[in-house]
């Protein structure tokens, strides 16, 4: 990490003929985002390393590890400076490079020929990644449906191949109905019924107020003071009494007053 | 049924179908005794020749046969649709390439070769498109899923088989390093796949 720029002292944006440039020029300003775009174009540490190697036409089998490590660290420092979210993989690779570098500095005993080149594993990974990178690009270039390939398709005359609507027999319908009724039956026992009680009570009151031989005016059975609920209950009681044949309603003319009396 | 009738049935079915039709699917179009597969192949070949001068061609892809617009006219046909085809990110293409060339492969192995984590979004996209599927699990701790490509993947790229994919570039050769890599191989593993297996198991 020795390559990171010093944290203190204002960092010059650039150097023009050796002179540090602290302020961005007003007439030509490249937003820092442009660099981020460039850095984000790397698909990870292997991709960045390959870029560094290829850019300088280095032999992948004989990487100058010290120089590459230096360059790699410079990019990592740049990414840090730009506060890019630095994937942990970049740091793992930095550690790996540093390890290779130090192992290469150590003298290797000649007799120990099973000691492999410290770079071998990295080279193997770089090569493997590069192969995949190449075929991935080739894959991207392949013609594909919706871009270069357009499967042909003609319309089929309407109605052909449509599944006929299934026939419903009467038995099926009845069976379905029976099932519905059965469920309704089950439900009925669970219903909480409060209203019938008060209607029952009101039926008694209405009956008591009526005589068998005299007519009472329909509207007089209602007490507006009871409010909407009371009126409805009274009306329901009258309908119930009527249904049970306990009272009779008489109206002499259309829209005329309705009279009520107890059935004989 | 004459050979010409057979060709007509095949032509109509391949045109009407919205997906490629396999030989078996085509064979089911006929009453028993259905034409032999060789007869069907001959009829398809005849059909292909009959379309030699037309703007559509009969091709074989992984799931079967389909008619498609001949390449020189594809660009114009594309104008029918305003939408530009989706661009695939390098991350997606690299992941797809690894699954295609190294299948069956676990996610850990993909990450090992690419050197970065594979985003779940990419795996989901590939699975949803039906280009890759889980074909099993590696019997190591965590039983990671093994991914492989599907016929739909080959169909999409107009390929009939995996061998038609662009060839993997050869690994560069250097005697010295070759020997060393061989050593690595003899002490541990040779094929990258098996090496990753070992690493996967170690995770």
Image (tube, rainbow, N blue to C red):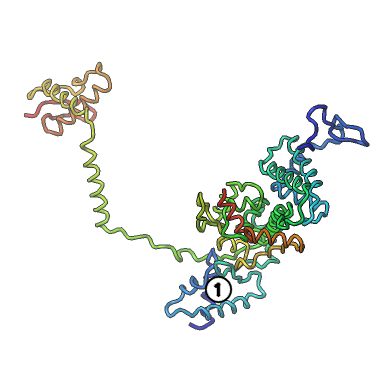
Most foreground residue, B27 or A262: B27
State left or right for residue B100 relative to residue B21.
Answer: right
Chain at numbered mark 1: B
Residue neighbourhood size for the residue with mark 1, other residues' Cα within 10 Å, grouped as few (<14), some (14–19), many (≥20): some
Q: Is residue A141 visible?
A: no
Instruction: Give coordinates of residue A154: x percent, y percent.
Output: 56, 66
Going by the picture, which residue comes out furthest to the bottom? B2
Instruction: Give coordinates of residue A28: x percent, y percent.
Output: 86, 36
Most foreground residue, A16 or B103: B103
Q: Is residue A65 visible?
A: yes
Residue denoted by label 1: B11
Going by the picture, which residue comes out furthest to the front? A111
Examine the rendered structure and indicate whether residue A26 appears above or below residue A104: above
Going by the picture, which residue comes out furthest to the left? A264
Q: How many marks?
A: 1
State left or right for residue A23 relative to residue B139.
Answer: right
Q: Residue at x 63, y 71 (%)?
A: B57
Q: Residue at x 60, y 46 (%)?
A: B119
Residue A205's image quarter? Answer: top left
């Amino acid at each position: 990490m020795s390559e990171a720029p010093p944290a203190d002292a204002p960092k010059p944006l650039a150097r023009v003929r050796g002179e540090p440039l602290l302020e961005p020029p007003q007439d030509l300003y490249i937003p820092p985002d442009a660099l981020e775009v460039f850095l984000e174009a790397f698909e990870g540490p292997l991709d960045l390393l390959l870029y560094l190697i290829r850019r300088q036409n280095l032999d992948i089998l004989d990487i100058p590890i010290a120089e590459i490590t230096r360059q790699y660290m410079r990019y990592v420092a740049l990414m840090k400076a730009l506060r890019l979210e630095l994937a942990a993989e970049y740091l793992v690779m930095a550690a790996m490079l540093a390890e290779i570098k130090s192992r290469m500095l150590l003298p290797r005993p000649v007799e120990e020929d099973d000691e492999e080149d410290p770079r071998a594993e990295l080279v193997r990974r770089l090569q493997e990644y590069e192969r995949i990178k190449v075929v991935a690009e080739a894959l991207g270039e392949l013609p594909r449906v919706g871009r270069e390939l357009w499967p042909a398709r003609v319309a089929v005359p309407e109605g052909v191949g449509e599944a006929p609507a299934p026939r419903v027999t009467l038995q099926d319908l009845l069976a379905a109905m029976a099932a519905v009724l059965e469920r309704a039956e089950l439900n009925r026992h669970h219903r909480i019924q409060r209203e019938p009680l008060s209607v029952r009570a009101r039926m008694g009151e209405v009956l008591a107020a009526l005589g068998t031989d005299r007519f009472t005016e329909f509207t007089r059975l209602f007490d507006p003071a009871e409010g909407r609920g009371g009126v409805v209950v009274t009306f329901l009681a009258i309908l119930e009494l009527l249904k049970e044949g306990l009272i009779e309603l008489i109206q002499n003319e259309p829209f005329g007053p309705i009279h009520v009396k107890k059935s004989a | 049924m004459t050979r010409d009738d057979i060709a007509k049935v095949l032509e109509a079915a391949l045109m009407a179908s919205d997906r490629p039709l396999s030989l078996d699917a085509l064979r089911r179009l006929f009453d028993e005794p259905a034409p032999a597969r060789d007869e069907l192949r001959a009829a398809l070949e005849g059909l292909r020749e009959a379309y030699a001068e037309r703007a559509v061609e009969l091709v074989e892809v992984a799931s079967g046969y389909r008619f498609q617009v001949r390449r020189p006219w594809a660009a114009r046909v594309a104008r029918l649709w305003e939408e530009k085809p989706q661009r695939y990110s390098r991350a997606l293409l690299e992941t797809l390439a690894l699954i295609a060339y190294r299948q069956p492969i676990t996610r850990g192995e993909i990450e090992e070769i690419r050197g970065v984590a594979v985003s779940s979004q990419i795996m989901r996209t590939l699975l949803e498109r039906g280009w890759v599927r889980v074909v099993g699990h590696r019997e190591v701790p965590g039983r990671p899923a093994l991914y492989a490509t599907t016929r739909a993947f080959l169909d999409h790229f107009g390929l009939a088989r995996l061998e038609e994919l662009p060839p993997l570039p050869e690994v560069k050769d250097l005697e010295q390093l070759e020997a060393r890599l061989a050593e690595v191989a003899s002490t541990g593993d040779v094929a990258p796949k098996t090496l990753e297996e070992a690493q996967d198991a170690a995770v």
